[in-house]
Image: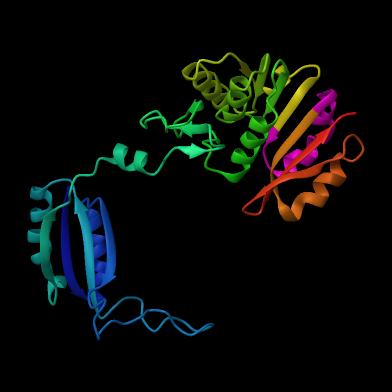
Amino acid sequence: MFELRLICPEDRVEPLSDALEALEALSVSVEDADADTDAERALFGEPGLPPPAQSWSRSRMVTLFGDEAQARDAARLLALQDFWEGCEVASIAPVPEQDWVRLTQSQFEPVPITRSFWIVPTWHEVPAGATEVIRLDPGLAFGTGTHPTTRMCLRWIAAHPPRGQRVLDYGCGSGILAIGAALHGAASVDAVDIDEAAAQATIDNASANGVQLVAGLPDQASGVYDTVLANILATPLKVLAPLLAGHVAPGGALVLAGVLERQTAELQAAYRPWLSLEVADTEDGWVLLVARRA
């Protein structure tokens, strides 16, 4: 990958952009060539008024080409055009290679749930003192342990281990809650989601963590469960109130997340005909709501 940088007057930006597109530049961006100098000029106008100009009086155009030959050919061909007057080539230089996999991985660190319970990407070492570990890499399905709603659900599971229980994870995403329940002693776990890809991700992640569960579409959930987990969003949680409440066994718990603090009252009202929801945890403006059936 090579970067071609051009300096041009304001009225040359549009024809140069069109020409660079025709020359199959991979990308084109325009900057103020005088940025961070006394000549720097903002393009923002007063509220309600048009901006004073569409571009800077001296613009820097930064373009990318697949290789050096393409970048140099583009510079040579542009210099032959009648609109080139007043323009100049500032530089042609290689773009440093990036290890995008490593860069992405560096953004995901192990996530502590409790002092002994951690979510750890597969490329990381397990932290010292972590006795309960979910190995989970970022993927297409929601649930990596980095979101407050996921952490609150997992904290609740760790504080109330479902040993010997039948557990339902409704809206399982990556399967992280279902796996957490299995690691904490659940006798059986059903994980369901409207997205088939999420169900498959749950199966794959469960296998990678050495736990047994059953994952599929929502109609797979049947009967009553000792613990029902649902980390979705407030609106679908309200719609699902009779269904989710109906899956809670006598003496069982319903654990809901994906709810903002300001939505607490409306969720409590939606479930009141069946269960009494209470705030069990809060984090960064989100709440965890829990109810127990008598």
Residue drawn at (12%, 63%) of the image: 78
Residue 54 lies in the magenta-colored region: no
Horizontal and vertical percent position of residue 139: 46, 33
The quadrant in which residue 5 appears is bottom left
The quadrant in which residue 163 appears is top right
Residue drawn at (83%, 30%) of the image: 245
Residue 103 lies left or right of residue 199; in this view the side is: left
- Give the image's coloring scheme: rainbow
Residue 231 lies in the magenta-colored region: yes
Q: Which residues are magenta?
A: 230-252
The quadrant in which residue 293 appears is top right
Residue 10 lies left or right of residue 123; in this view the side is: left
Number of dots carrying numbers: 0
Q: Which quarter of the image is occupied by the C terminus?
A: top right
Residue toward you, 45 or 19: 45
Horizontal and vertical percent position of residue 116: 53, 32
Horizontal and vertical percent position of residue 129: 47, 31
When the figure is inspected, residue 29 is found, relative to residue 286, above or below; the finding is below
Residue drawn at (22%, 52%) of the image: 25
Q: Outermost residue, front direction? A: 129
